[in-house]
Structure formats: structure tokens, C-alpha cells
Image: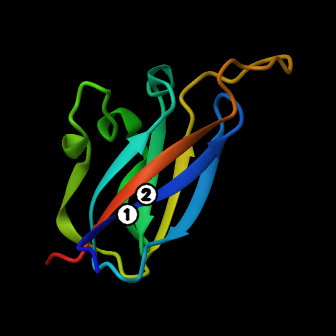
């Protein structure tokens, strides 16, 4: 078995200003969540976007945590994109709950917004290291 896995959680955002709750479960074959990386399809969607995260009902990020602290641009090497957790976060089938808030202002009068809908990809770096 591999020592690590990158598990993806997809969050679908349909309109500017959306607040989307999500639930997932980590792979049971891995013992620890080592890090997190958030990928958005366009950099213009990053400002103002927020992510709240809980693992097994333990607050990791409050709902007002800025996504810009968990993402990076193309200029960053792939192996340096992750935010690493200093504390040990259990994986092994843990429940992951969260709330993503889109940072763009809501569109008025039923107008369609450019770039919507889109998918936020949250990558959890799972490992078997201690």
C-alpha cells in the first residue's frame, strides 16, 4: 500500500455569494491528514472566499478562514502548495464537514454571472506516517 494519498472533495458553487455545506469521509486506509490545499478554477474567485472545516467535530478552521491562506498560484511548485497541519489529525475514516462561502457579491435581478457554476476542489493529503 502507498504511504500517501491526495483525497479530493468537490464543492459545487452555482452563484456569486453562495454558501455551500459539504460532508465527506477520509479514506480508512490512511491514519493522518497531513495537509490541505484548495484549488479554484480562476484566481479572481479567491478574494473574499471563506472555508470552515471540522474533522470529527473538532474545529480546524472557523467559517471565516480566508481561502487565500490555503491556495497558491501557478508560480508555486506542486510539492509546496499544501498548508501543513502541525498537530496530528486522524484520517482513518474520519468525518470531514465544512462550509465554503463564495467571495463574489451576489448578482441582482436574476442576471447570470460569468464563470458560474464552478467547482472548488479541496485536496486532503493523507498519510500513514506518525
Query: Residue 44: horizontal and vertical position, in percent?
Result: 48, 19
* 100 horizontally vs 39: left or right: right
The residue that label 2 is drawn on is 53
Disc nearer the start of the sequence (1/2) = 2
Q: Residues within 10 Å of mark 1 (few under 14, many from 20)?
A: few
- In depth, the one of 82 and 108 nearer the eye is 82
Q: Is residue 55 above or below residue 79?
A: below
* 121 horizontally vs 90: left or right: right
Query: Closer to the observer: label 1 or label 2?
Result: 2
Q: Based on the displayed image, in which of its 4 quarters is residue 111 positioned? A: top right
Q: Residue at x 46, y 39 (%)?
A: 50
- In depth, the one of 51 and 75 nearer the eye is 75
Q: Based on the displayed image, in which of its 4 quarters is residue 116 positioned? A: top right
Q: Disc 1, disc 2: CB below 8 Å?
A: yes
Q: Is residue 93 above or below residue 115?
A: below
Q: Is residue 107 above or below residue 100?
A: above
Please name the colour scheme applied to the rendered image. Answer: rainbow
Query: Residue 115: horizontal and vertical position, in percent?
Result: 65, 23
The residue that label 1 is drawn on is 59
Amino acid at each position: 500500500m502507498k504511504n500517501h494519498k491526495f483525497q479530493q472533495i468537490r464543492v459545487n458553487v452555482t452563484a456569486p455569494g453562495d454558501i455551500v455545506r459539504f460532508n465527506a469521509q477520509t479514506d480508512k486506509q490512511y491514519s493522518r491528514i497531513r495537509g490541505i490545499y484548495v484549488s479554484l478554477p480562476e484566481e479572481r474567485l479567491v478574494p473574499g472566499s471563506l472555508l470552515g472545516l471540522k474533522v470529527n467535530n473538532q474545529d480546524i478552521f472557523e467559517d471565516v478562514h480566508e481561502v487565500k491562506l490555503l491556495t497558491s498560484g501557478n508560480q508555486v511548485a506542486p510539492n509546496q502548495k499544501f498548508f501543513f497541519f502541525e498537530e496530528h489529525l486522524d484520517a482513518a475514516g474520519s468525518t470531514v464537514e465544512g462550509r465554503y462561502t463564495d467571495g463574489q457579491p451576489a448578482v441582482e435581478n436574476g442576471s447570470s454571472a460569468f464563470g458560474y457554476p464552478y467547482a472548488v476542489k479541496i485536496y486532503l493529503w493523507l498519510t500513514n506516517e506518525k
